[in-house]
Amino acid sequence: MKCRLGRLAQTIGARHIHTITAAEVEEWLDEQKYTGQSRINYLRVFTSFFNYARMRRLIEFNPADRSAI
């Protein structure tokens, strides 16, 4: 999990978590050319991470949620 989140963090940098959009998550996945199971695996990790942030009230919505993408 850390590795997958680390790759996204390298792109997003030191931004606040609430500024990350669903479009950015989708764009990042597209840029990495992830398809099939790899894309699903990354999305699952991101969804879990953002759900945790939502539970902690750091964000209002999960930008990795499939309905947001």
Image: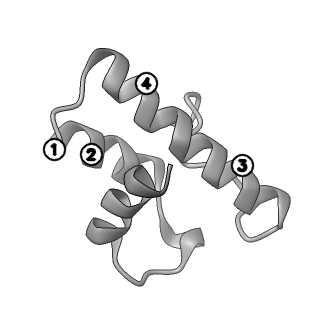
Q: Horizontal and vertical percent for residue 48?
A: 65, 44
The residue where tag 1 is placed is: 31
Q: Residue at x 72, y 62 (%)?
A: 53
As helix, strand or loop, the secondary structure at mark 3 comes to helix
Q: What's the CA distance linking mark 3 and mark 2?
A: 20 Å
Q: Earlier in the sequence, mark 3 or mark 2?
A: 2
As helix, strand or loop, the secondary structure at mark 4 comes to helix
The residue where tag 4 is placed is: 40
Q: What's the CA distance linking mark 4 and mark 2?
A: 14 Å
Residue 21 visible at all: yes
Q: Residue at x 53, y 80 (%)?
A: 16
* Category of crowding for the residue at label 2, using alpha-carbon neighbours closer than 10 angstroms: few (below 14), some (14–19), many (at least 20): few
> As shown in the figure, which amino acid type bears the numbered disc 2?
Glu
Compared with 62, 58 (above or below) is below
- Marks 2 and 1 in Cβ contact (< 8 Å): yes
Q: Earlier in the sequence, mark 4 or mark 3?
A: 4
Q: Earlier in the sequence, mark 1 or mark 4?
A: 1
Compared with 20, 30 (above or below) is above
Residue 51 has which mark?
3
- Marks 3 and 2 in Cβ contact (< 8 Å): no
